[in-house]
């Protein structure tokens, strides 16, 4: 059980920026920032930076540890998704989510409480980005779906 996440973490490291040729050669300051963040924060937090976690929300039910792929979005019962990548929390509202829940989420709602809990549990406060399907630029969400086709410049 303890070794179960290792393949995901290795895959995440290979697909992420820390081993990216583009990041190392074209943006060395970002690479140094990432290296510093990875070595100075506790492992329980850095796990999210290496391999982000995707949660699905529907009718006040939370489904955690979902696969990081678009296929999962089509098969899942959720209509609001949140990816925690340590540096950034991306909350993605599907069209169904926009109809079922208020946007932006109310401060006393379950999504805001989840965001607050994550922010309070870390030494670094992540940037929160809200994305609406079909309205906003979906790249902040899609870029974190590691199980999609290999990204240009990634380690894979």
Image (cartoon, grey):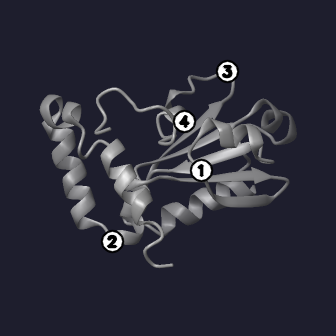
Residue at left offset 67%, top offset 20%: 135
Q: Which residue is mark 4?
A: 141
- The mark lying in front, picked from 1 and 2, is 1
- Asked if 47 appears above or below 111 in the picture, the reply is below
Residue at left offset 72%, top offset 44%: 80
Is 7 displayed left or right of 96 in the figure?
A: left
| Lower sequence index among marks 1 and 3 | 1
The answer to whether one can see residue 108 in this image is: no
Q: In which quadrant will I find the C terminus?
A: top left
What secondary structure is found at the residue carrying circle 3? Answer: loop
- The mark lying in front, picked from 3 and 4, is 4
| Lower sequence index among marks 1 and 2 | 2
Name the residue nearer the viewer: 111 or 85: 85
* Alpha-carbon span between mark 3 and mark 4: 13 Å
Whole-percent x and y of residue 13? 32, 51
Q: Which residue is mark 1?
A: 67
Q: Which residue is mark 3?
A: 135
Label disc, if present, on residue 140 of the rendered structure: none
Other-residue count near label 4 (Cα within 10 Å), few / some / many at <14 / 14–19 / ≥20: some
Whole-percent x and y of residue 30? 21, 40
Residue at left offset 58%, top offset 60%: 116
| Lower sequence index among marks 3 and 4 | 3
């Amino acid at each position: 059980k303890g070794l179960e996440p290792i393949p995901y973490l290795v895959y995440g490291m290979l697909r992420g920026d820390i081993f990216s040729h583009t990041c190392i050669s074209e943006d060395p300051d970002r690479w140094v920032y990432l290296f510093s963040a990875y070595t100075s924060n506790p492992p329980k937090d850095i796990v999210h930076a290496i391999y982000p976690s995707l949660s699905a929300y529907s009718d006040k039910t939370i489904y955690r540890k979902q696969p990081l792929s678009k296929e999962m979005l089509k098969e899942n019962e959720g209509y609001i998704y949140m990816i925690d990548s340590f540096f950034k929390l991306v909350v993605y509202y599907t069209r169904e989510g926009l109809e079922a829940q208020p946007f932006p989420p109310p401060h006393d709602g379950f999504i805001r409480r989840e965001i607050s809990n994550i922010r309070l549990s870390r030494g670094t406060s992540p940037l929160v980005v809200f994305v609406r399907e079909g309205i906003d630029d979906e790249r902040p969400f899609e870029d974190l779906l590691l199980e999609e086709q290999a990204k240009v410049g990634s380690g894979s």
